[in-house]
Amino acid sequence: MPSFTNTELNTFLTENANIMRLSTMEPDGHPYVTPVWFEYTEDTFNILGRKQNKWVENIRGEAKVGACVDTSNAPYARVIIKATAEIVDDNWFGDWVSMATRYMGEEKGSEYYNSTKNIGRVFIKIKPLKTISWYGSDWHPKYYKDFGRPPKAN
């Protein structure tokens, strides 16, 4: 179960419409996990929220976040991120049509973008401190080194 090379990681995070599961910290110390769209560029994840989103409020209180971007079907792939979040603009009206079309397709994405582009977003940068990745259907050696190798997945 190998890790992604830098090129493979960039491809996985830019050419697919995988959802990020973002984990923020609630004021009482519990994690709060929510799915978000993202753009990955220059080793940074850009995400957009709405001012009333609970996870945006959580980031205001604690910049430390975690995230996972993965696939649900074989061959499996996973990227785990330990990061810091930074609110760049609290009332952002920039162009995010490429994000909308990435996740919703050309027609529906353009329609959604045009119908909501006049609603200010909270623009957030997620800057990874540590990234762990793997892909494939085989187990990592640490899971079987003392017990013998499990059968390979088909």
Image (cartoon, rainbow, N blue to C red):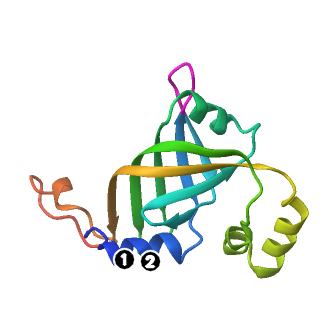
Q: Residues within 10 Å of mark 2 (few under 14, many from 20)?
A: few
Q: Position of residue 142 (x, y in %)?
A: 17, 55
- Residue 114 visible in rendering: yes
- Residue 154 visible in rendering: no
Q: Determine whether 22 is above or below 43 in the image.
A: above
Give the residue displayed 87% in from the left and 72% down from the top.
Answer: 111
Q: CA distance from mark 2 to mark 1?
A: 5 Å
Q: Which residues are magenta?
A: 25-31
Give the residue type at disc 1: Glu
Helix, strand or loop: magenta stretch: loop
Seen as rendered, the residue at the extreme right is 115
Give the residue type at disc 2: Thr
Q: Position of residue 3 (x, y in %)?
A: 28, 67
- Left or right, 34 with respect to 8, comes to right
Q: What residue sits right under mark 1 in the picture?
A: 8
Give the residue displayed 20% in from the left and 54% down from the top.
Answer: 143
* Residue 9, quarter of picture: bottom left
Q: Position of residue 42 (x, y in %)?
A: 44, 66
Is residue 92 or residue 79 the one in the foreground? 92
Give the residue displayed 11% in from the left and 60% down from the top.
Answer: 148
Q: What residue sits right under mark 2 in the picture?
A: 11
Element type where label 2 sits in the image = helix
